[in-house]
Amino acid sequence: MLGCGVEGFSQKAKLKTKKTSQKNTTSTINYSGNPIFRGWYADPEGRIFNKKYWIYPTYSARYEEQVFLDAFSSTDLTHWTKHNHILDTAYVKWARKAIWAPSITKKGTKYYLFFGANDIQNNEQLGGIGVAVADRPQGPFKDYLGKPLIDSFHNGAQPIDQFVFQDKDGQYYLIYGGWGHCNIVKLNTDFTGFIPFDDGTTFKEITPKGYVEGSFMFLKDGKYYFMWSEGGWTGPDYSVAYAVSHSPFGPFERVGKILQQDSTIATGAGHHSVIQVPKTNKWFIIYHRRPLGETNGNHRETCIDELLFDDKGFIRPVKLTKEGVKKQPS
């Protein structure tokens, strides 16, 4: 059985008068702090389950060391509990390394965790996008299919960086792809395969201009916001851009970048997700970035900042901060 140890800890950042705050200082206003928890973690997906915020990141290390996933939960975005090894390759026999970019959804009483594994470079190699299942958001997750759900390249898209999206009609889709190509596929009811589109195709390419990897989609005011990462993930210019459409299939016309490095805060800001505080109009972006002066590509930290919109619905450029966001009830 998978190990699901729990480590509790608190990270607070407080505002000081006329100074940018650092973590673990004292004041009367609680902030999350950035990074929001300790350790090298990247590609974070934020979700809300059972009145808790959850973050599912990639463990950021050498590919050969990326053989498990941890998760983190919080009731207020300030105090975080670590859930160790919610998924481990010891229980996914076809996965050997490079467990990346988890994406999770709840359907019925089960939690389904989609993940990339093995960083395949061609269709002759074993790996791709898998699915694991559990009864709880903290796992333990077990391999659902005994094989990858997507095990080969389609439309030039490397099978990585998957995001599971539920449309307003209840239909689930998987949006994924690396190497500059992005596909959307329609999941069948039990997540064991796909339903072809009306034109007979299964893998529909929706790649916008500038797309590299790290797809994400959300609905707001009837519009589909499609977001992705650009640039090289090991470099300082890694960033996030977006497009808007009235359909999850596009067409998606690029609007522009909304998240990128700040020479006074951090570099390599990218591969993100977005959450909305329930019953509010507060939105936050959860992403990874690299500390100033850090040159190791794997040294990435998970952070959170406000996501703001203008009166026309366009996303404002994100301001990177050290203090993060205020305590928020879930």
Image (cartoon, rainbow, N blue to C red):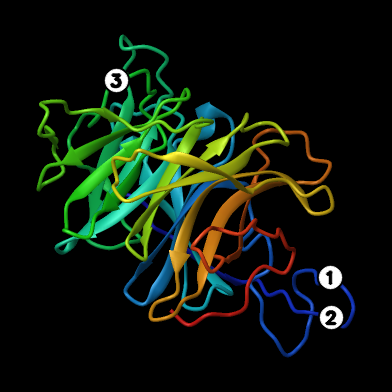
The reply to whether callout 3 and callout 2 are in contact (CB within 8 Å) is no
Identify residue for label 1. 20
The numbered mark, 3 or 2, whose residue comes first in the sequence reads: 2
Which one is in front in this view, the residue at disc 1 or the one at disc 3? 3
Picture disc at residue 208? none
Marks 3/2: CA distance? 52 Å
Position of 103 compared to 255: left or right?
left
Tag 2 secondary structure? loop
Identify residue for label 3. 154
Give the amino acid at mark 3: His
Q: Identify which residue is drawn at 50% across, 68% down.
A: 283
Identify residue for label 2. 16
Tell which of 45 and 2 is nearer to you: 45
Q: Identify which residue is drawn at 77% across, 50% down.
A: 262
Q: Identify which residue is drawn at 28% across, 56% down.
A: 105
Residue 111 screen position, x and y as percent: 24, 57
Residue 326 screen position, x and y as percent: 62, 78
Q: Quadrant of residue 182?
A: top left
Give the amino acid at mark 2: Lys
Give the amino acid at mark 1: Thr
Marks 1/2: CA distance? 7 Å
The reply to whether callout 1 and callout 2 are in contact (CB within 8 Å) is yes
Which one is in front in this view, the residue at disc 3 or the one at disc 2? 3
- Label 2: how many Cα within 10 Å (few below 14, some 14–19, many 20+): some
Tell which of 249 and 25 is nearer to you: 249
Q: Is residue 83 visible?
A: no
- In the rendered image, the quadrant that contains the C terminus is bottom left
Residue 191 screen position, x and y as percent: 16, 43
